[in-house]
Amino acid sequence: MEVVVKESYEEMSKLSAELIAEVIRRKPRAVLGLATGSTPLGTYKELIRLHKQEGLDFSRVITFNLDEYVGLVHGHPQSYHYFMSENLFKHINVNPKNVHVPDGTAKDIPGFCRWYEEQIVKTGGLDLQLLGIGSNGHIAFNEPGSSLGSRTRIKTLDDKTRQDNARFFKNMNEVPKYAITMGIGTIMDARQLILLANGAGKADAILKTCEGPITAIVPATIVQLHPKATIIIDKQAATKLTREYPAEPRVLVLA
Ligand code: F6R
């Protein structure tokens, strides 16, 4: 695991986009795991710029999103389907057939989750998984206490996560209670991980993730066990770290 501390959100986003772009340049049919939330927005903006100005080609790229709220239709402005379309997919040349976002409206959720896992395996597995982190240390919607070996499934959202996400809804009652999420085992099977965090609100979770013991109570700590994980954070998210970390990764491409 490598921790890289950047001066700003913009620099964090540029580096993460560059790492993703390098994976696509090396393997045009790359299988990418993607995240939603505020954190990756700058990365997506930079990927869109690389596509439009430097011809980064997504035509063969395959994507799998981490999670989706249960019960929100795809066109709902807070659904992750809508988020991904607005913030990335409609601006790049990804083939809609290659895009996968969990279906929060599935009638048979366990069956859907099995299908989702099978599709990841069928495409050859995730080459790179992009992650944000919750202020409670969750990754995807694997809340504190989640099994570190879990697979894609339905999860009840933590009160803290619902409060954090309430800013996107009219009121707390509208915040969904359940989500479909890739499991921690699913995430750990990806060949490379990038975990992003910015802002002081993530400083505690980042301290535990980078320097704390591995525990299901802070699911993100599992990335310490991944052989190719890069944690890219801004200065604010780094304020509680006790050790010095570089501003550049050792190698740009983790071969
Ligand atoms: C989203 C996801 C979540 C977020 C996390 C941080 O797909 O998997 O784990 O990454 O909740 O959210 P933001 O980036 O909004 O702080």
Image (cartoon, rainbow, N blue to C red):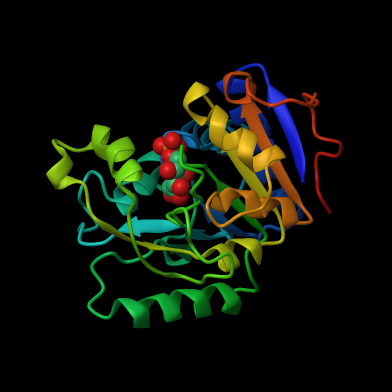
Locate the C terminus by quadrant.
bottom right
Q: Is residue 80 above or below residue 19?
A: below
Q: Is any atom of residue 55 visible in this view?
A: no
Numbered label tally? 0
| Residue shown at 27% from the left, 50% from the top | 79
Tell me if residue 28 comes above or below residue 238 in the rendering: below
Depth order, front residue of 45/255: 255
In the foreground, 211 or 100:
211
At horizontal 78% and vertical 26% (from top left) the residue drawn is: 243
* Camera-nearest residue between 138 and 9: 138
Which quadrant of the render holds ligand 1? top left
Give how far across and how far down residue 139 sits, in percent.
Answer: 51, 50
Residue 200, given in percent of the width and then of the height, sits at 51, 22
Residue 144 at what x, y percent from top left? 47, 53
Q: Is residue 67 visible?
A: yes
On screen, residue 12 versus residue 164, left or right, reads: right
Tell me the quarter of the picture where residue 247 sits: top right
Measuring from the top left, give residue 97's x and y in whole percent: 43, 67
Residue located at (40% from left, 61% from top): 101
Residue at 80 percent of width and 23 percent of height: 244
Q: Is residue 201 left or right of residue 236?
A: left
